[in-house]
Image (cartoon, rainbow, N blue to C red):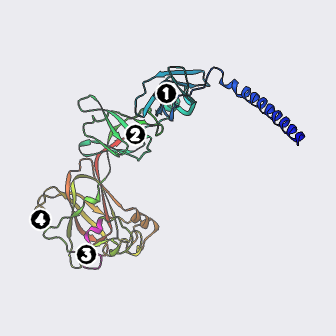
Amino acid sequence: MKYFKTLFISYFFGGLLVALNSCQKQDHAYRQFLEGGEKIYVGKADSLQAFSGKNRVKLQWLLLADPTIKGAVVYWGNRRDSLRVEFQKTDDIDTISVVVPDLEEGGHDFEVVTFDDSGNRSIVRSTYGYAYGSKYAASLLPRSLAGVELGENNALVFNWRPTSAQLLKTRVSYTNKENEIHVVEIDSSQHELVLTDWKEETPVQYASWHKPDSTAIDTFLSVDRELDLRLEFNADNEVDPALFSRYGLPGDAPDWDGSGNDFTNLWSGVLAGGAPARAWYRTANGSGIPHHFQIDLGRAVAISKIRLWQRGSMTEHQLLYANGNLEQFEIWGSVDPAPDGSYTGWIKLQDGEIVKPSGKPVGENDDIDVQAAEAGHLFEFGEDSPSVRYLRIKVLKTWANTDYMFTSEVRLWEWGTTLVY
């Protein structure tokens, strides 16, 4: 029993010595990290963001609860470059913004470290930002232009195509009627620009501002594009048939009462099919020769060309140069016709005759005859053609000497000024 107690005491003190020795070694192991005192970190740059710019980048972050923060150091270029800023922390969550200037065009990695008055620093927060420059600017184009045309009183009308979210607005520079340079701007949602005071035949320049991306703090102006605008007087200005309507007067030929027959078929734009398809118009049986009818053109025009299509131009070729198709007629115009339907106030503009190219008799058509009918028969008017609002067609003869008339389509052009660029 005495032997057992002695053995126990020996083992107890031996283990105690081993434990003490072990503790001394552990203390030695971590003591080296506490040399110079306990390490203190200040609050970090929270929610760090980068915003692109023109040869610069804006960094932005939040300061949360640490009241000891006095400033920050921003590093970039593998810490070869740095920028030190100081600020005063408030009791609220603060937003800190720092613009890093004079950056080369391209991407940059940034590090932000905050500090206090005692030299304590935060852990590093990193982000990536992009600086745009002259290379990007040189790649920019102005907004795409769908077309330019003349409006009323020679106003200049621009039509712009839809654009991307990166294109913000467009600047247009022009010379006004007082010979002054005038500048207007339109945003990307605007698709038409009307310049009522443009001085005729002077150039127009336009350029557009672009925002490189959604985070950008700067915009870039594209290169200027110049339009060399000039006016050209010609006969190729089509009169809009949407303005046309019937102008009925006493003594007009009545309409045929067949299905689908309607006076507006004369400008429907349909050349094939029957009257229900709006392909042709017909006056009534017994209308007598001569007879006439009128079209209100919707405004006064100086007619330069009329193109007329026979019924059967595209189909029913057996009707070409036959039946009730026009052969001889007169074209009259007026700005103030007599309300009684007489020819008072009317001017005869031209005698019209549809000529069959082959010269073959009725019922015999060559390919050249069909081709001429498909193209429409053209009647041209000189530059001195008077302005008229109302057009009267006086039927003198049909190919089969019928007492009625039918025809497919009438289209008009006017003398006017066209914008060339």
Residue 351 coordinates in the image, percent (x, y): 25, 60
Quadrant the C terminus occupies = top left
**Residue 363 visible, this angle:** no
Task: Name the chief secondary structure element in magenta.
Answer: loop
Q: Determine crowd level at label 1: few under 14, some 14-19, many 20+ residues with C-alpha closer than 10 A.
A: many
Task: Specify the label residue 56 is tagged with.
Answer: 1
Secondary structure beneath label 2: strand
Q: Amino acid at mark 4?
A: Ser
Between the C-alphas of marks 2 and 4, the distance is 60 Å
Mark 4 highlights which residue?
A: 342
Extreme-front residue of the structure: 2
Residue 186 part of the magenta-drawn span? no
Secondary structure beneath label 4: loop
Secondary structure beneath label 1: loop
Residue 265 part of the magenta-drawn span? yes
Nearest the eye: 172 or 318: 172
